[in-house]
Amino acid sequence: MQYLVNDKRADPKLILPECKSILVLALPYSPIGNAECRMQNAEFQIAAYALGEDYHAIIPPKLKQIVEFIEEQLGYKIPNRYYTDTGAILERELAQRAGLGWIGKNSMLINPKLGSTFILAEILLGVELEPDAPFVADHCGTCSRCIQACPTQCILPNRTLDARRCISYLTIENKNEIPAELRPLLGNWIFGCDVCQIVCPWNRFSFPADSSLAPKIPLPTPDELILSSVEFNLRYKRSPIKRAKRRGYLRNLAVAMGNSGNQNAVPLLEQAAQDDEPLIKEHAQWALKKVGA
């Protein structure tokens, strides 16, 4: 992910020269592994944050309203920039410095009263605000549940993460083939992964999802494997899932269907194996071999 290698990440003033304060915010999404999440008994798994509308469209207008409120209180316009997972900015580190939590062994920001099921956002402001105290405690302790539970063992003991093995990376950011040796480890995850959050004991405190991020998309089904481009774009027009594009999403779905071992998937996989998109075709052919067809 070379787009993240950027000098601006370490110095917000390279983004907003007038920056004097950074307001860090968090918006909760569906708690992991409960009825609200809707995925616990689903045939295919999608990361909980992606079950609602695309947060890239939901959060920025809220940030704009906060900026307008601050300007109204001050009585004048102030320089500002705001982000939510869109700019080259160190979101978790800023959130820790703002007192929102600590960065856990799974690399997620964890709040002792909220868990980690929230999306971060930042507003860079050209005005000084009284800073909150940073969150200096580390409440992971000796717990290593996330390290042990990770299907691909991408969480390393030194608090780093090998993105090349992470299911979230492989199913979203990765635009090419999923390495054959890792495909069986993806299980039934077709967009993102929540395993390290599911096992994290702090997520028993997760807040209910903000109404704007509540689950809305229909549960995925095997027949999505033959969605046309038009059908895919209509189905996921307002969803984060569109980031994977049709080729990536159907690639992931084919792998999950292969991992299922379900012979009923064979007719759909055979159709996908004739797809015009080579990425879908190759993974569908792999899945057919996996189910012994």
Image (spheres, rainbow, N blue to C red):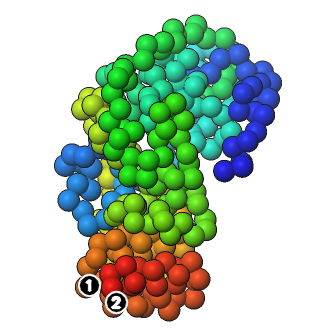
* Residue 146, position as x, y percentages in the image: 36, 38
Rounded to the nearest whole Å, what is the CA distance between mark 2 and mark 1? 8 Å
Q: Amino acid at mark 1?
A: Gln
Where on the picture, by quarter, is residue 236?
bottom left
- Provide the residue designation for mark 1: 263
- The residue at the point 76 percent across, 39 percent down is 6
- The residue at the point 49 percent across, 78 percent down is 283
- Please give left or right for residue 21 compared with residue 99 in the image: right
Query: Is residue 247 placed above or below 182 in the rendered structure?
Result: below
- Please give left or right for residue 254 compared with residue 44 in the image: right
- Nearer to me, 235 or 219: 219
- The residue at the point 67 percent across, 22 percent down is 125
**Circle 1 crowding by C-alpha within 10 Å: few under 14, some 14–19, many from 20:** some
SS for callout 2: loop
SS for callout 1: helix
- Pointers 2 and 1 in contact (C-beta within 8 Å): yes
**Which circle marks residue 210 in the picture?**
none
Query: Is residue 7 placed above or below 69 in the rendered structure?
Result: below
- Nearer to me, 212 or 204: 204
Q: Amino acid at mark 2?
A: Ala
Labels 2 and 1: the sequence-earlier one: 1
Q: Is residue 60 shown to the viewer in this render?
A: no
* Residue 227, position as x, y percentages in the image: 44, 81
* Residue 161, position as x, y percentages in the image: 53, 41
Query: Is residue 221 placed above or below 67 in the rendered structure?
Result: below
- The residue at the point 72 percent across, 49 percent down is 2
Where on the picture, by quarter, is residue 131?
top right
Quarter of the C terminus within the rendering:
bottom left
- Provide the residue designation for mark 2: 293
- Nearer to me, 168 or 229: 168
